[in-house]
Amino acid sequence: MRRSSFINGLLILAGFSGILGGCDQKPPPGKNQVTINPVIGTPTDKQVPLGVDKSPMDMSYFPVDYPKLKMSKDNQPPLIARVIYSRPQKSGRAIFGDVLKYGSVWRLGANEATEIEFFKDVVIDQQKVEKGRYVLYCIPYEDKWTLVLNNDLFTWGLKIDSTKDAYKFNIPINRTNYPFEVFTMEFEKQGEGAELVMEWDSVRAKLPFTY
């Protein structure tokens, strides 16, 4: 019995040493070593990452690239405005007059309501707009857009309370020579002020302001 127990002990130790030795072994040159984690096992549905939003959220600043300017310069220009919005895609659709009906409210993006913030008073179409944060939405027509600044903050884009409209502006539109696949909003310097440029499908619209 003692001899049998001793032999069994040696076998156990030999097997354990083999395992340890295997851990220290390096793969031959040019070979990739694959490690299998028995705890994780086969991925479940919960481990599979969800796809990104088809209309990802974006943010534009004026001055353009303001965060980079702020980090790279000691005397950066003051922040004037920024817009937060989601970017829907055209995806082969006819957008204006079809997906977006003329004369109907459009959230000027997708998902949550688009928001614009002015960090100082500005003038739009000879109207003084007080600094602050506003929901920005649109009523598109064939020859113009009506843009509305609204005080109904933190809301879903399709549930804007029009009784809280603060300012309205009619702006002309231009037809482009090629379609924009993804809806885009960005600021551009213009004279003594700037323009919020909006582009999607074959339409470009601009909201000018001074400050």
Image (cartoon, grey):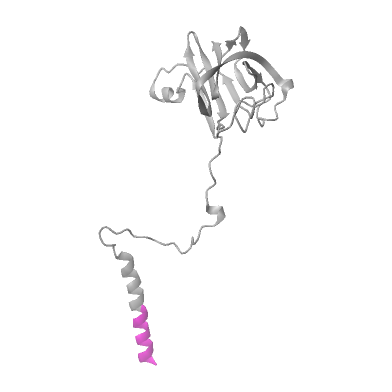
Q: Percent from the top left, x then y, of residue 112?
A: 63, 32
- Identify the image quadrant of the N terminus: bottom left
Whether residue 173 can be seen here: yes
Q: Is residue 141 above or below residue 90?
A: above
Please, which residue is most extreme toward the top here? 126
When asked about the image quadrant of residue 136, the answer is: top right
Which residue is painted at 35% across and 81% down in the image? 11
Which residue is painted at 46% across and 20% down in the image? 64
Whether residue 81 can be seen here: no
Q: Is 14 on the left or on the right of 75, as rendered?
A: left
Please, which residue is most extreme toward the right here? 163
When asked about the image quadrant of residue 165, the answer is: top right
Magenta span contains residue 191: no
- Identify the image quadrant of the C terminus: top right
Q: Percent from the top left, x then y, of residue 79?
A: 50, 18
Q: Who is closer to the viewer here, 49 or 101?
A: 101
Q: How many marks?
A: 0
Q: Who is closer to the viewer here, 51 or 58?
A: 51
Q: Is 107 on the left or on the right of 77, as rendered?
A: right
Which residue is painted at 63% across and 18% down in the image? 142
Q: Who is closer to the viewer here, 146 or 86?
A: 146
Q: Is 66 on the left or on the right of 169, as rendered?
A: left
Magenta span contains residue 9: yes
The span picked out in magenta is 1-12
Q: Is residue 158 above or below residue 81?
A: below
Q: Percent from the top left, x then y, of residue 167?
A: 66, 15
Which residue is painted at 49% across and 8% down in the image? 192
- Magenta span: chief secondary structure: helix
